[in-house]
Image: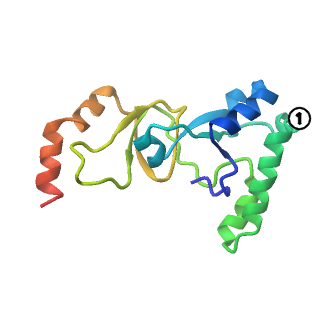
Amino acid sequence: MPNDGGTLLLNDDEKKEILNINPELNKFIKPFLSVKEFINNTNRWCLWLIDVDPGTLKGFTKVMERIEAVKNHRADSVRMATKKLALYSTLVGEIRQPNSNYIMLPRHSSENRKYIPLGYFSKDYIVADSCLSISKTSKSHFGVLTSEMLMAWVKQVWLD
């Protein structure tokens, strides 16, 4: 969960603007997957600044502006837990990112779909809190989870 007021997340134009000014920031911008992007096959990006030395970021004005906005957003919150996060304004609020390839599935989806929408992603795709991730998986696991056999079981067990 970013808990950033939308500041660490970028659309295609914002990503392009930042990289036009500072192309070396590309290594800190990762694809961000929420249910909305996954289902609609659209792009969103995340400034992923884990383990980045704060001194490294000082020369990047656009990034520093965003970090300051995150800090202010969190400091202005009424929730104490969010206020504490203002000390870590370079990071998304809650990090539950898998360290391996993972299967991503939406927390909520229509029961009218023929299949549960799933995706198989590398750890470089940042998964949002609107999704669940199953780490340490293989494409074989993905195959089973997208099979008609599993869907028949789901319909019998969960939907009856």
Tell me if residue 2 comes above or below residue 83 in the rendering. Answer: above
Residue found 45% across the figure and 37% down from its top: 41
Q: Nearer the viewer, residue 43 or 89?
A: 43
Image vertical order of residue 36 relative to residue 58, above or below: below
Does any portion of residue 39 appear in the rendered image?
Answer: yes
Q: Badge 1 local density, few (<14 within 10 Å), some, or many (20+)?
A: few
View extreme (front): residue: 13
Q: Position of residue 31 (x, y in %)?
A: 56, 35
Give 22 or 76, whichever is nearer the viewer.
22
Residue drawn at x 70%, y 27% as measured from the top left: 26
Quadrant of the image occupied by residue 83: bottom right
The residue to which callout 1 is attached is 59
Residue at 78% across / 55% down in the picture? 69
* Apparent side of residue 101 relative to residue 60 in the rendered image (left or right): left
Left or right of residue 28, residue 69 in this image? right
Three-letter amino acid code of the residue under disc 1 = Gly
* Image quadrant in which the C terminus is located: bottom left
